[in-house]
Image (cartoon, rainbow, N blue to C red):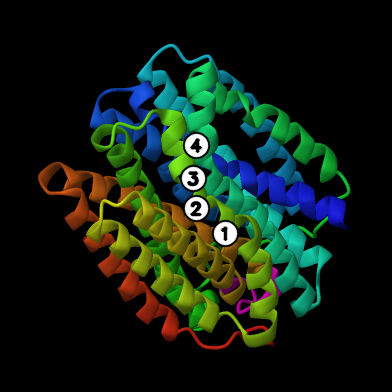
Amino acid sequence: MARLLTGLSLGYFLVMLDTTIVTVALPALSPSLPAQQWISNGYTLTFAVFLLVAGAWSDRFGARRVFFTGLVAFAALSGLSALSFSTSLLIGLRALLGVAGALLVPSSLSLIATAYPAPAARAKAMGVWAAVSGTGLVAGPLLGGLLTEAFGWRAIFLVNVPVALVALALSRSAPPTPARRGRMLPARLFRVRAFPLGLAAGAIVNFGLSGVLFVLSLYFQETRGYPPSATGLAFLPLTIPTAFNPIFTGRLVARIGPRIPAVSGFLLMALGTLVQACSASAVLSVVALALLGFGVSLAIPSLLTAVVTAVPSDLTGVAGGALNASRQAGAALGVAVLGALLTSTTTAITLVAAAALLLAGSLIVVAIPAARTQPVR
């Protein structure tokens, strides 16, 4: 069972890694801010759009088949991205990578739900899943900076290939899931109050995280003059908490429910963003990024658990896809909106705007009720 969970977690690790691994490499990929935004958002936009479709496919054709298809496509498209000879081609391949990544998320959630039917065991498994994948999200800048400086930007795509192959080998024991037919986003999902509130909160948490990473990556390189490797290392305080804290979060959620950990996560993210906005000190940057890392690793696993455990068991794939679609739409908006704001104002004001939205997100999470224990009919 541990082997399977590792394989499923590595699949989502790849998805999250590719969300941020390009962040530090953007100046090497293109000197144009609009092109940098499209390289980043080309992936997240198609990922967000196709997550709902992927969730429905996972329920209809079987999560195991969809997950394996996504892994093979992700490996192939990553190899092609490394061979790109133009910015336009790279943006197009990044968009296709987003589609492949979309296949991996709801299918892995469905496979976890099947392999761990007990709620407490499922919450702990999701904590491990989120820990591994969350490490990919925030290790992206560090790994991207080191690879770009040592081997060039093409290495940030080549690294996906062996990881995808390992994930494929480890997850071969995934249990078959029954094929189900039904609507995408059926209306009964919205009768579960945690579902629409979770979608809104998910969009905000990724708006803040991806937008702040984008802004700080440019700030560290263009204002402080850091090279890519130093920029990646500067994000290390954000990376470390996500390597272990989601496991603690999974255990905490299993004991007290998702609401308190999720609210705490939003508040820590907002505080960390404000600290970074108010000071240019390198020491306070470490504190700010650590707060952001702890906040992310509390908020995201808690939101996932709140939504997936609240909806009917036969719709976990669609619900998981919808939540991650909202998160990735928020990520794309974060890069676009904060990037546009950055062109007309200062880094500090841009970060304050992100912190204000994260505070609003904490209020939304407060309204999320305790998860239901019975399916909604």
Residue bearing mark 4: 21
In the displayed structure, 123 sits above or below 43; it is below
Residue bearing mark 1: 241
In the displayed structure, 55 sits above or below 95; it is below
Instruction: Report, in whole angstroms, how far the alpha carbon at label 1 lies from the one at label 2.
Output: 7 Å
Instruction: Report, in whole angstroms, how far the alpha carbon at label 3 lies from the one at label 4.
Output: 15 Å
Residue type at mark 3: give it: Phe
Residue 118 position by quadrant: bottom right
Q: Which disc is residue 237 wearing? A: 2
Residue type at mark 1: give it: Pro
Q: Is 357 positioned to the left or the right of 251 in the image?
A: left
Q: Secondary structure at mark 1?
A: helix
Residue visible at 32% across and 22% down in the picture: 30
Residue type at mark 4: give it: Ile
- Residue 59 visible to an observer of this rendering: no
Mark 3 vs mark 2, foreground winner is 2
Q: Secondary structure at mark 3?
A: helix
Lower sequence index among marks 3 and 1: 3
Instruction: Report, in whole angstroms, how far the alpha carbon at label 1 lies from the one at label 4.
Output: 18 Å
Q: Which residues are magenta?
A: 307-314
Instruction: Report, in whole angstroms, how far the alpha carbon at label 3 lies from the one at label 1.
Output: 26 Å
Q: Are marks 2 and 4 in contact (CB under 8 Å)?
A: no
User: Percent x, y for residue 32?
Assistant: 24, 26
